Image (cartoon, rainbow, N blue to C red):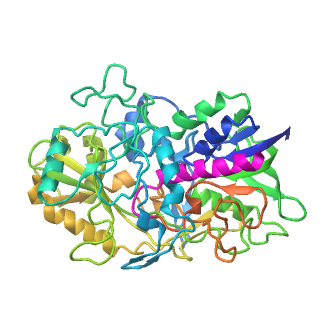
Amino acid sequence: MADDQHYDVIVIGTGAGGGTLAHRLAGSGKRILILERGGYLPRERDNWESTAVFVKGKYLAPESWYDRHGNEFQPEVNYYVGGNTKFYGAALFRLRPQDFGELRHHGGISPAWPIDHQDLEPYYTQAEHLYLVHGRHGEDPGEGPVSAQYAYPPVEHEPRIQQLSDDLEKQGLHPFHLPIGVNLTQDEHGGATHESVCIRCNRVDGFPCLVRGKADAQVICVEPALEHDNVRMVTGANVRRLETDATGRVVTKVVAELADGSTAGFSADIVVVACGAVNSAALLLRSANDRHPRGLANSSDVVGRHYMRHNNLALMAVSNEPNDTQFQKTLALNDWYLGADDWDYPLGGIQMLGKSDADQIRGEAPRWAGKASPDMPFEVLAHHAVDFWLCGEDLPQPDNRVTLDGEGNIHLALDEKNNIEGLKHLQRKLQGMLGHLGMHPHHLMPHNLYLHKGMPIGATAHQAGTIRFGTDPESSALDVNCKAHDLDNLYVVDTSFFPSIGAVNPSLTAIANALRVGDHIAERLG
């Protein structure tokens, strides 16, 4: 089967990168085709059920990848319109200015970007406004210069988290309101108003939003883009390879397997890949041909290499007093992001997670044996739980990489001990403060279920870095506009382009960059 229409732009993927880019170009009048591997996420009660989402992994892609030893694992990926933003926690942080330069870590060097913070800053502001980010610039003293305040005020702390914020300030620290993308209107007490789409529930983090109150790529970008007559989307289109002309300089066909099992070919002047860092690299590797024997855009041999996914810890503390918080994800702390008085290297950041419930805690019970108080039932433990997310920087290493075997299966090699000393130090910082924060000093338990971590390698939610951009075609696959050095019409706009990942959630940077690249493509198309 062949699609007889030639498009101006084909966008492969509808997540933070692809969905945002399609939205940016939708008003241009150019013919845009969006190809999405999945369909629309079913709206059903299980969207908000912990057992379905976390314990059973109902919405995870039913596929297996393999580690460097050939062991099978299920990755934390979701194939739906909106991509992984359907399940993200909508924490939308900027990278710090220092993250764009070279940074020395305990475990090695975090390399500099070919653009600096000021190049991306206007797009950060636009991204924050587009994705309804609630926050307050100026509270985090190290965030760097901003050109405009958030368009929406911060999500107010509930009483237990306000007390936590106050207690952290008493320790001489600088807690700030976590920037989060939600369609929320608050009353004078911080509650959701009658007309608010977001209802300030306890399902914001890791769950899809049944009421469309979370700023995901489907709601914010894809659906508005499809209101334009010049934009079309095909769902159930699993792109298998990209074909080029005889010179190897131009992508001439995008070949996809459709939901009915047939194969279709699509063509466009410009092709944009945004399948996620692992799948985008796999697509380029699968598209090898005589002109590109190592894969498309891979004369440098970097495609698939330098995979990063953050060094993360999800932890649950036990409050001395009950924690009645519903919308817990309102606070963050970056005082030790770049170092501490007793540590010369970056540690990373701390932020709140969505609130644990009894079903999640019950699912964790086998891992917590002997750590939790044996006389505290799951429901009581959940009522006292305070949940933290610790995020440290993973460093790019060439042997942390995506490869394909002879049958086309994805293999992911990962050094799980890469630069973890900073994260350990950050955990000790939090542990040492618990007694001053109204929490039991000896109960800080790993919340691995939140990470879908049957194996540590399976936590792929923050994947990045496999098709890095740069000025040197010998050491990068993409130029500064995220166009492949080796091809004239191929771009990549998911988190693959990251040369380093910093220590904050990568989504806002992917969104901001997609807006930047979208402007470049619009100018190129005239």
Residue at 80% x, 46% y: name it: 268
Please say if 99 is above or below 145. Answer: below
Closest to the observer: 489 or 455? 489
Q: Is residue 394 visible?
A: yes
When the figure is inspected, residue 136 is found, relative to residue 220, above or below; the finding is: below
Residue 216 is situated, as x and y percent measured from the top left of the image, at 49, 39
Q: Is residue 519 left or right of residue 181?
A: right
Q: Is 285 left or right of 461, judged from the image as shown?
A: right
Point out residue 199 in the picture as x, y percentages from the top left corner. 33, 28
The answer to whether residue 59 is visible is no
Quadrant holding the N terminus: top right
Total marks placed: 0
* Picture quadrant of residue 468: bottom right
Q: Residue at x 43, y 34 (%)?
A: 209
Residue under the image location 38 percent in, 59 percent down: 144
Q: Main secondary structure of the magenta part?
A: helix
Query: What is the span of residues highlighted in magenta in the rendered image?
Result: 502-526
Front residue of 81 and 507: 507
Left or right, 120 with respect to 27, comes to left
Classify residue 212 by image quadrant.
Answer: top left
Q: Residue furthest right?
A: 246
Q: Quadrant of the C terminus?
A: top right
Question: Where in the figure is residue 436, as x and y percent of width and height?
Answer: 9, 58
Magenta stretch containing residue 506, yes or no? Answer: yes
Q: In the visual, does 341 lie left or right of 1?
A: left
